[in-house]
Amino acid sequence: MPNADAPLLEVDDLRIEFRSGREIVRAVNGASFTVRRGETTAVLGESGSGKSVTAAAIMRLLASPPAHITGGRIRFNGADVLGAPMAQWRKRCGRDIGMVFQDALASLNPVFTVGWQIAEPFKAHGVLPAKAALERAVALLGRVGIPEPHARAHDYPHQFSGGMRQRVMIAMAIALDPSLLIADEPTTALDVTVQAQIMDLLLDLQRERHMAMVLITHDLGVVAEVADRVAVMYGGRVVESGLARDVLPRPAHPYTLALLESVPRSDIEQQQLNPIVGSPPNMATLPSGCAFHPRCRRATSECRAARPPTVKVAPGHHAECFYAQQVFDGR
Amino acid sequence: MNTPADSVSHTPAISAQAEMVTVRAGLPWWRLLARDPLALCAAVWLAFLLVCMLIAPMFLGKAANDMNLLARNLPPWSLDKGWLMILGSDSLGRSILARLLVGAQNTLSVAFAAVVLAMLIGGALGLIAGYVGRGVGNLIMRLSDVIQGFPSLLLAVIVLYMLEPRVANLIIVLAVTRIPSYLRVTRAEVLEIRSRGFVDAARAMGAGRTHILWRHIVPIVAPTLLTILTVDFAIVMLSESGLSFLGIGIQPPEITWGLMVAQGRKHLSNAWWLAFFPGLMIMITTLAANLLSNWVRLITDPVQRWRIEAPKAAATNA
């Protein structure tokens, strides 16, 4: 058993390409971050920044072709993930790592009752016989806040509301008490009020089960409230990482700064929004040097020419920018 | 962000859910069947045929083959020669009614065996083609192309000419010619389903390939195959009659509806009932199979099931 301080999940310089015909889309270009036991790491980024692909790679859900993992490594509990035989890895999925997907309706099988589906992990792993598994499923349904779990266990996914479905997904993901939960934009498809309830539920479960969580999101508000650590992704790279309480008040990467500035605020009078100019990069034709330079206020010729180094601006707080120190110091 | 406890915040939703539960609370299938008159008629007809298959040859076997040359081509709707002649008699004076009921056994068992065999083989190959590798999939698809490219009647003629036209051979030949449709549909569905979210979710939950195939893919493909099966049922009955007509299918004195149509063809101008009644039987049976399969598909689909259950729910709400 590795010691408690060792990271539970390490993603190191992960590179993923999608090849279709002659086109190569580099979705992830050297992403690195770590997740510790019992902690929440938020992976933050715009659409297409490679965050969901990274999550899928951790679970080894990417279909190859078209996806090819061209470099880097993922370690879970010290053991190599990508090199492990698939059959062996599947046995750990669900048991050690659970995953919650964005679209709960699509992620539930329409022809089975939710009770059956929550019981499925127990049966697939041969942990419990069918009847006992169903009882556990009912208990789990109750735990994730579904009223009348006994009756609802016999309902089908389409008979649930969006928030309820996401609760069902969460019940499935935590059924085998995994030590890591990957939540891929768990609240994106939901109403704002329901979003808050789902996040509360996830946090509750996390505390109760001492579970680590990778929270993939583009919602800065969520990150600010729940994350212990944050990894900001842009153009398939983690451009800034550190403790959320260090990074969010004092970012060191111009992208993180711009992202924070683009959030509408109600506490100060604002004439207009501050969006980040331009659009996210085309992953098939990434800009040279720093991928953010076309949209960056500080960009110089240096940024176009070479990829910036990783700068350590404070203990545990890294940013990939030539001017990280200046941004960090607010200059 | 901290909201009150979940149970509190969802109170309004609970009553709505209770309502849903009452709608869902599954009625037994026979009560649902009673609610759909068309499906009920279809089921009754098929049950009647099933009984005929089992007992008609015992009781009517002799009547079906007894010739009465004095009562040749007797027109229907006359009780002068006994109730067996109500649908008329054929060119050898045999009771059409008795022949229809006795013929149900051969006709339906051959057609049923052939389509089920085709569905099992085609479905299995389609699952493999869609779910295993591309190489195996291509090989299977080319094989199916070969079967489809070869005229099915010619294939049947060659096989049945070389082997003897026994019932088992007939079933195999008919099944082989029907395999490609199941194979293609299954493969296409599998390719679509395997990229659906719940398959990824199942993999993330730790399900292996066989688990996903049986628990997530097969249950979704099955209703489609069932629908094709009932449509194929008619096609196979007709091909079987075609083969009988060519003299390489089931041979007299055995009786099948297709054979009766073929034998009656010569007399169409003077005794239409010889070919009409067996043709009618084929049509009604096919229709019944279609209606019933449609109903089965509806009640086994949780998303569609309310369409049958709804009338009652509407009545209670009103």
Image (cartoon, coloured by chain):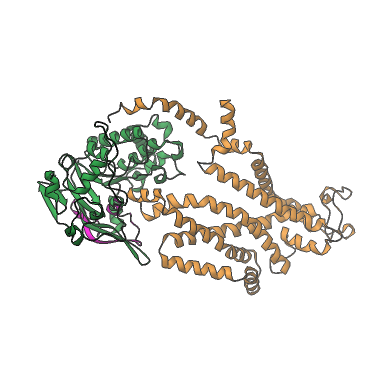
Query: Relative to residue B239, is residue A274 drawn left or right?
Result: left
On screen, residue B146 above or below A92:
below
Q: Residue B117 in the image: state x and y as whole percent.
A: 56, 59
Q: Residue B72 in the image: state x and y as whole percent.
A: 87, 59
Q: Which of the pair B54/A215 is nearer the observer?
A: A215
Q: Which residues are magenta?
A: A55-82
- Residue A213 visible in image: no
On screen, residue A222 above or below B113:
above
Determine which quarter of the picture holds residue A100: top left
Q: Residue A43 in the image: state x and y as whole percent.
A: 24, 46
Q: Colour of chain B?
A: orange
Quadrant containing the C terminus of chain A in the rendered view: top left
Q: Name the residue rendered at 59%, 44% in the picture.
A: B295
Q: Residue B287 in the image: state x and y as whole percent.
A: 67, 50
Determine which quarter of the picture holds residue A87: bottom left
Q: Residue furthest front?
A: A271
Picture mark count = 0
On screen, residue A43 above or below A65:
above
Query: Relative to residue B76, is residue B157 drawn left or right?
Result: left
Residue A86 colored magenta?
Answer: no
Residue A78 colored magenta?
Answer: yes
Query: Relative to residue A211, is residue B215 drawn left or right?
Result: right
Q: Which of the pair B238/A20 is nearer the observer?
A: A20
Q: Which of the pair A20/A65 is nearer the observer?
A: A20
Q: Name the residue rendered at 45%, 57% in the picture.
A: B191
- Residue A62 visible in image: yes
| Chain with green colouring | A
Determine which quarter of the picture holds residue A151: top left
Q: Residue furthest left?
A: A315
